Image: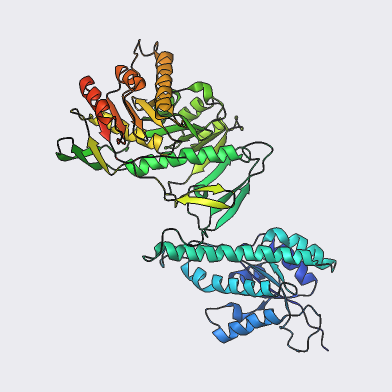
């Protein structure tokens, strides 16, 4: 019997630690089969290989590829074979690719993912079937242990099973990516497929979970989509669960505001007498939006014509709770804003960029993590993890589709702009939620109460506290706010009366209570405009 050379198929997208593995295979007299970019990489690093044309699916025939797959399937653990063909003992597969959501045939990488990746996945599937005889390496993190076990001739069945599990994990992610890409583009598909199969890849292990005793990891949607994929850590320690949660929540609020208001919006509107017209909401061009978030609660937000003024408006609400909070800014952070931010103990700052001078200022405060975000992305769905399941719904990202002016008085243009700002603030706050806004800054925000009345009581209290704090610097101005916005229907109550007496001139809510007329009549009496959206924004 002829002793056969052991063969290893090497065809990878991720080349991390590849030379370490291939150097061992060369030293141990393995035959390396490769093709394409991987082969070029091996050649450039003086690793001998045999060009395997059957890995070139663009030139090989289906029968040739099938025969090559059969070689892997029929590989025996024995060093000897009845077949004298020295290529027929494929004992190791080093294969990997990145599962990717596909958008269009015009994607530059489409041909690679349509031709080569399916073949790589087919080879991995074949290796999984024959895992007792074939080592399947799909993750560079496993190369070193594989070399150790092969060098000592002690490859354990437990390790083989572990590698098989990793291979199946990659294959299932690929299948999920293909399935999701096809179904979301199909006019026949149900928006909620029979199986929720959306691939997420581990991006990094985090410092710890919500509490120090908890471990945590961040996963990102395969294919570069989503907010998480567009965030880069520029400075600071590995983020914690809270930092990632608060930073992404803040950035998504920034994105929601600008995606809704990046251009002038004309909203179909109707007076109570049935007269129809369009309400104009001015775009946010030339403005900067800052928002402060802690424990996924908004603790300050403001809009101004420059970043420093916007930041100061965000601080207008409550500076006593912003320690360990995250701040998001819609514009690049410059030196002036950096000097203001370092006066406080923020855990992270997320923005589309940081000037060199700003980064130099932050470099002396390494506790602050600098996160650079790359644009805004719409979410595919909202989900809540449950014991034994996951609850999924479409995303609530539309402010309103039609407005109903229920009072004699219409809101002014400035009031309408602030009402739109307020809707964004309550849309993803825990219900019931209400916000009071004055001069494009939050003066009171309340969320998470199980009662509308308690929410209104709390937001009124918060607005009064903010007014008292700034009374002196505002020359005795005791105005509580300009507008009130709620995520649901509200009744006439003492809190609403206090807010109206305190200067609120416009209210936006959903309407729909039996007591609606009572509130409408009171607003008419006080010269306040009230707008119904007919759309709740409950968030749990």
Q: Is residue 428 left or right of residue 215?
A: left
Determine whether 92 is above or below 436 in the image: below
Q: Position of residue 229 (x, y in %)?
A: 51, 50
Residue 432 in view (yes/no): yes
Q: Position of residue 294 (x, y in %)?
A: 52, 32
Determine whether 189 is above or below 328 in the image: below
Q: Position of residue 82 (x, y in %)?
A: 78, 89
Extreme residue in the front direction: 514
Query: Residue placed at 52% from the left, 60% from the top?
Result: 197
Query: Residue placed at 56% from the left, 83% from the top?
Result: 60
Query: Residue placed at 30% from the left, 20% from the top?
Result: 500
Q: Position of residue 268 (x, y in %)?
A: 22, 43
Q: Tell me which corner region of the image, top left, top right, bottom left or bottom right, holds residue 452.
A: top left
Q: Tell me which corner region of the image, top left, top right, bottom left or bottom right, holds residue 426.
A: top left
Q: Nearer the viewer, residue 491 or 292?
A: 491
Q: Nearer the viewer, residue 248 or 49?
A: 248
Q: If the image is split into quadrants, where does the N terminus sit?
A: bottom right
Q: Is residue 104 left or right of residue 341?
A: left
């Amino acid at each position: 019997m002829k002793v056969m050379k052991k063969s290893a198929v090497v065809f990878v997208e991720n080349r991390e630690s590849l030379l370490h593995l291939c150097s061992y295979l060369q030293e141990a007299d393995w035959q390396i089969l490769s093709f394409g970019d991987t082969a070029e990489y091996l050649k450039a690093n003086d690793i001998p290989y045999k060009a395997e044309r059957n890995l070139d699916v663009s030139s090989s025939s289906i029968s040739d590829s099938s025969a090559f797959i059969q070689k892997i399937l029929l590989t025996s653990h024995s060093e000897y074979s009845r077949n004298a063909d020295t290529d027929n003992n494929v004992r190791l597969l080093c294969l990997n690719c990145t599962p990717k959501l596909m958008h269009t045939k015009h994607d530059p990488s489409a041909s690679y993912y349509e031709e080569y990746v399916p073949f790589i996945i087919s080879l991995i599937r074949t290796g999984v079937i024959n895992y007792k005889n074939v080592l399947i390496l799909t993750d560079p993190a496993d190369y070193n242990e594989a070399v150790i076990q092969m060098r000592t001739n002690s490859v354990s069945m437990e390790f083989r099973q572990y590698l098989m599990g990793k291979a199946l994990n990659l294959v299932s992610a690929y299948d999920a990516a293909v399935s999701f890409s096809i179904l979301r583009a199909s006019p026949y598909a149900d928006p909620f497929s029979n199986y929720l199969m959306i691939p997420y890849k581990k991006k990094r292990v985090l410092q710890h979970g919500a509490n120090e005793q908890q471990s945590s990891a961040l996963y990102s949607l395969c294919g570069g989509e989503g907010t998480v994929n567009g965030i880069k850590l520029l400075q600071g320690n590995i983020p914690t669960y809270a930092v990632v949660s608060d930073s992404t929540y803040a950035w998504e609020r920034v994105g929601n505001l600008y995606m809704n208001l990046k251009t002038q919006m004309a909203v179909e509107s109707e007076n109570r007498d049935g007269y129809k017209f369009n309400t104009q909401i001015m775009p946010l061009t030339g403005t900067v939006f800052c928002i402060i978030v802690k424990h996924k609660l908004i603790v300050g937000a403001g809009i101004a014509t420059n970043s420093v003024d916007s930041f100061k408006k965000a601080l207008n609400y409550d500076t006593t709770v912003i320690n360990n909070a995250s701040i998001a800014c819609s514009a690049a952070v410059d030196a002036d804003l950096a000097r203001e931010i370092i006066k406080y103990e923020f855990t992270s700052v997320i923005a589309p960029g940081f000037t060199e001078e700003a980064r130099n200022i932050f470099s002396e405060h390494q506790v602050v993590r600098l996160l650079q975000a790359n644009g805004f992305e719409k979410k595919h769905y909202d989900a809540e993890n449950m014991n034994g399941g996951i609850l999924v719904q479409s995303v609530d990202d539309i402010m309103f589709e039609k407005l109903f002016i229920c009072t004699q008085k219409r809101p002014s243009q400035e009031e309408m702009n602030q009402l739109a700002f307020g809707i964004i603030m309550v849309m993803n706050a825990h219900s019931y939620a209400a916000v009071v806004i004055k001069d494009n800054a939050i003066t009171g925000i309340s969320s998470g109460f199980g009662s509308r009345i308690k929410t209104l009581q709390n937001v009124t209290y918060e607005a009064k506290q903010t007014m008292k704090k700034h009374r002196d610097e505002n020359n005795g101005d005791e105005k509580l706010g300009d507008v009130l916005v709620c995520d649901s229907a509200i009744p006439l109550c003492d809190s609403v009366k206090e807010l109206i007496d305190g200067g609120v001139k416009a209210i936006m809510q959903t309407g729909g209570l039996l007591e609606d007329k009572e509130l409408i009549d009171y607003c008419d009496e006080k010269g306040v405009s009230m707008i119904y959206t007919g759309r709740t924004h409950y968030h749990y």
